[in-house]
Image: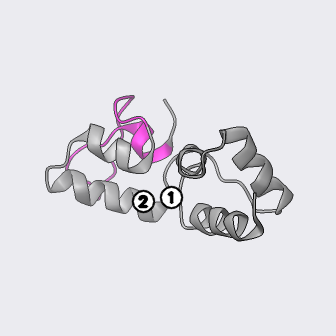
Amino acid sequence: MLASKVARLIDIYQDGAAISQLATQFGINRNAVTKILTVARVPLRSPGLNARQIDEAVRLYAVGQSLARIGDRFGVDAHTGQERTPTQARPIPLSAATGRS
């Protein structure tokens, strides 16, 4: 992969994209994405959403977006488990918040 594409992949990952999303976007498999990030010494995060993405998912859910659509948007499963935090008016799936089932 060209250095410019590697740099773009790293930037997109650091902006919160999931490894699976990057694999699809760049036409490579998830293991290749992980290897690129590891070789570049980019700290890998746990699957799931970061705090900014969770806030966005909660906002989208509050305005009526379906869990399936939110899950698709963030590349996480939208239908496994549920979690409610004190700041959320309605539950969101545990997997949408954390990437865990």
Callout 1, which amino acid?
Asn
- Give the labeled residue for mark 1: 50
Outermost residue to the left: 64
For badge 2, the amino acid type reads: Gln
Labels 2 & 1 near each other (Cβ < 8 A): yes
Tell me where residue 23 appears, x and y as whole percent: 60, 45
* CA gap, disc 2 and disc 1: 5 Å
| Residue occupying the far front of the picture | 2
Q: Name the residue under label 2.
A: 53
**At 72% from the left edge and 63% from the top edge, which residue is drawn?**
6
Q: Where is residue 95 in the image (x, y as percent from the top left)?
A: 44, 37
Seen in the image, is 60 located left or right of residue 24? left
Q: Where is residue 58 in the image (x, y as percent from the top left)?
A: 29, 55
Q: How many labels does the image show?
A: 2
Q: In this view, does 62 lie above or below 98?
A: below
Give the dominant element type of the magenta stretch: helix, strand or loop: loop
Q: Can residue 84 be seen in this view?
A: no
State the SS at label 2: helix
Quadrant where the N terminus sits is bottom right
Using the rendered view, name the quadrant where residue 82 is placed. top left
- Mark 2 is surrounded, within 10 Å at the Cα level, by few (under 14), some (14 to 19) or many (20 or more) other residues, namely some
In this rendering, the answer to whether 18 lies above or below 42 is above
- Point out the stretch of residues depicted in magenta: 77-98
The residue nearer to you, when weighing 20 against 59, is 20
Location of residue 55 by image quarter: bottom left
- Neighbour tally class for label 1: few under 14, some 14-19, many 20 plus, Cα within 10 Å: some
**Residue shown at 66% from the left, 53% from the top:** 45
Depth order, front residue of 45/29:
29
Residue 25 horizontal/vertical position (percent): 53, 51
Left or right of 75 in this view: 78 = left
Question: In the structure shown, which secondary structural element does the residue marked by tag 1 occupy?
Answer: loop
On the question of residue 85 being in view, the answer is yes
